[in-house]
Amino acid sequence: MPSMSNGIIADITAHIRRFGGDSTAWCVGTTRDWHNPVFDSRQNEDRDYDLICREAYTPAPARAVRDYFVTQCGTAPANDSSPDGKLVHAYKKPTLQVR
């Protein structure tokens, strides 16, 4: 992977450690723009602190970063990923709250 991808991987790994520790509790995906429903829903829930987004130069390294986290770290792939997106985002999976 190019150093660009390594930098994104390092940023996301540090973020996961800081806000959740276990990578299996996170989703990673790619998107084309900042108007992604994931971003809107995380902000509406006032939980945008667990969201991280980094921009790759092209979609290929963005997909490589997503694939690294899914295959090597056990994160879940985000359902809304765009194969031609160059933004890589990661967020903590929603937890069910029992009332």
Image (tube, rainbow, N blue to C red):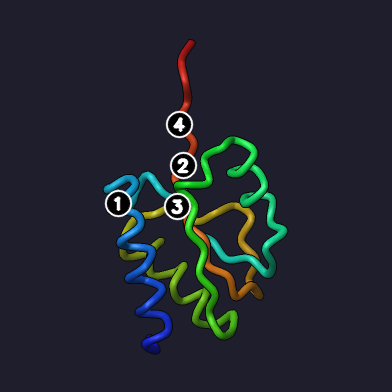
Which residue position holds label 1?
A: 18
Q: CA distance from mark 1 to mark 2?
A: 15 Å
Q: Are marks 1 and 2 in contact (CB under 8 Å)?
A: no
39 in relation to 58, above or below: above
Which residue position holds label 3?
A: 76
Which residue position holds label 2?
A: 93
User: In which quadrant will I find the N terminus?
Assistant: bottom left
Q: CA distance from mark 3 to mark 1?
A: 18 Å
Looking at the rendered image, the disc whose residue lies closer to the viewer, 2 or 3, is 2
Q: Earlier in the sequence, mark 1 or mark 4?
A: 1
Q: Are marks 4 and 2 in contact (CB under 8 Å)?
A: yes
- In percent of width and height, residue 35 lies at 72, 59
Looking at the rendered image, the disc whose residue lies closer to the viewer, 4 or 3, is 4
Q: Earlier in the sequence, mark 1 or mark 2?
A: 1
**Amino acid type, mark 3:** Ala
Q: CA distance from mark 2 to mark 3?
A: 9 Å
Question: Few, some or many C-alpha atoms within 10 Å of disc 1 (few <14, some 14-19, many ≥20)?
Answer: few
Indicate left or right for 7 with 62 as reference.
Answer: left
Looking at the rendered image, the disc whose residue lies closer to the viewer, 1 or 4, is 1
Disc number for residue 95: 4
Q: Are marks 2 and 3 in contact (CB under 8 Å)?
A: yes
Determine whether the residue tagged by mark 3 lies in a helix, strand or loop: strand
**Amino acid type, mark 1:** Arg
Q: Are marks 1 and 4 in contact (CB under 8 Å)?
A: no
- In percent of width and height, residue 44 lies at 64, 38
Q: How many marks?
A: 4
Question: Few, some or many C-alpha atoms within 10 Å of disc 2 (few <14, some 14-19, many ≥20)?
Answer: some
Residue 75, quarter of picture: bottom left
Question: Few, some or many C-alpha atoms within 10 Å of disc 4 (few <14, some 14-19, many ≥20)?
Answer: few
Looking at the rendered image, the disc whose residue lies closer to the viewer, 1 or 2, is 1
Q: Earlier in the sequence, mark 4 or mark 3?
A: 3
Q: Residue at x 69, y 50 (%)?
A: 37
